[in-house]
Amino acid sequence: MPADDSMRADSALINVAAFLQVQRRERLRAFIVHAPARSGKTAFARKLASIEKGEYIDILNMVASDIELCREVDELDAAFLKRTALSAAARGAGLVLLDEFDFLVPVWGGDVSQLIEWVRKLQEPETGAVVGLLMRTVPALESLQLSNTKGQSRVLRLDEIRGI
């Protein structure tokens, strides 16, 4: 299936508003935005959440500031992220952006199978909201194939997204 280029402002950059409009109609709504460390992912996510009336959640800060979560850090999994996203959706967020979560998922060896499993669990329809996961780029993400029904990749590089 050919990719739908309607989400692109030109041949090089993704129009994130158009992408989110497509994702809202999808049954499987989760997506990933990745970029190198200190490249602006957090600023992007905060601004996007503000514009889209969504909710930005810094998972690392959330865990670090909660003594119970700190104690359970080795047991936190996709269910924890899903509960976090469901809570935000219950508060009315149609877009939930989970930043700084990748410390929970071992992807540095090149094996992204656990990450893919987490994305699948987060995209189950009862979440209701579109869920974006923001993480550092690891080489395996560059070839990860997760697409929506329009053929658009749900794994986006931050530098491929048109400014918002």
Image (cartoon, grey):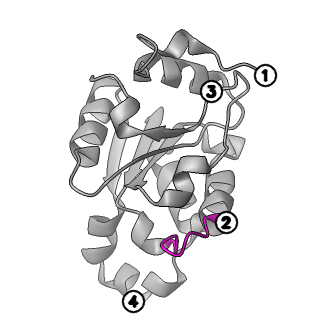
Q: CA distance from mark 4 to mark 3?
A: 39 Å
Q: Which residue is mark 3?
A: 152
Q: Which class describes the residues within 10 Å of circle 3: few (<14), some (14-19), or many (20+)?
A: many
The Cα atoms of the two marked residues, 2 and 4, are separated by 25 Å
Q: Main secondary structure of the magenta part?
A: loop
Q: Earlier in the sequence, mark 2 or mark 4?
A: 4
Horizontal side of 67 relative to 144 (left or right) equals: left
The residue that mark 4 highlights is: 71
Question: In the image, which disc is placed on residue 37?
Answer: none
Disc 1 versus disc 4: distance between alpha carbons? 46 Å
Q: Is residue 144 magenta?
A: no
- Most foreground residue, 72 or 147: 147
Q: Amino acid at mark 2?
A: Ser
Which of the two labelled residues, at mark 1 and mark 3, occupies the earlier sequence position?
1
Sequence-earlier tag: 2 or 1: 1
In the rendered view, would you say 122 is above or below 11?
A: below
- The residue that appears at 49% across and 59% down in the rendered structure is 139
Residue occupied by mark 1: 1
**Kind of residue at disc 4:** Arg
- Mark 2 element type: helix
The boundaries of the magenta stretch are 105-112
Residue 93 in the image, given as x and y percentages of width and height: 43, 36
**Residue 108 location (% of width, % of height):** 48, 73
Q: In this rendering, does residue 91 appear at all?
A: no
* Residues tagged 2 and 3 counted as in contact (Cβ below 8 A): no
Q: Earlier in the sequence, mark 4 or mark 3?
A: 4
At label 3, which amino acid type do we have?
Gln
Element type where label 1 sits in the image: loop
Residue 16 in percent (x, y) is at: 42, 23
Q: Earlier in the sequence, mark 1 or mark 4?
A: 1
Crowding near the residue tagged with mark 2, few <14, some 14–19, many ≥20 C-alpha atoms within 10 Å: some
Q: Nearer the viewer, residue 63 or 38?
A: 38
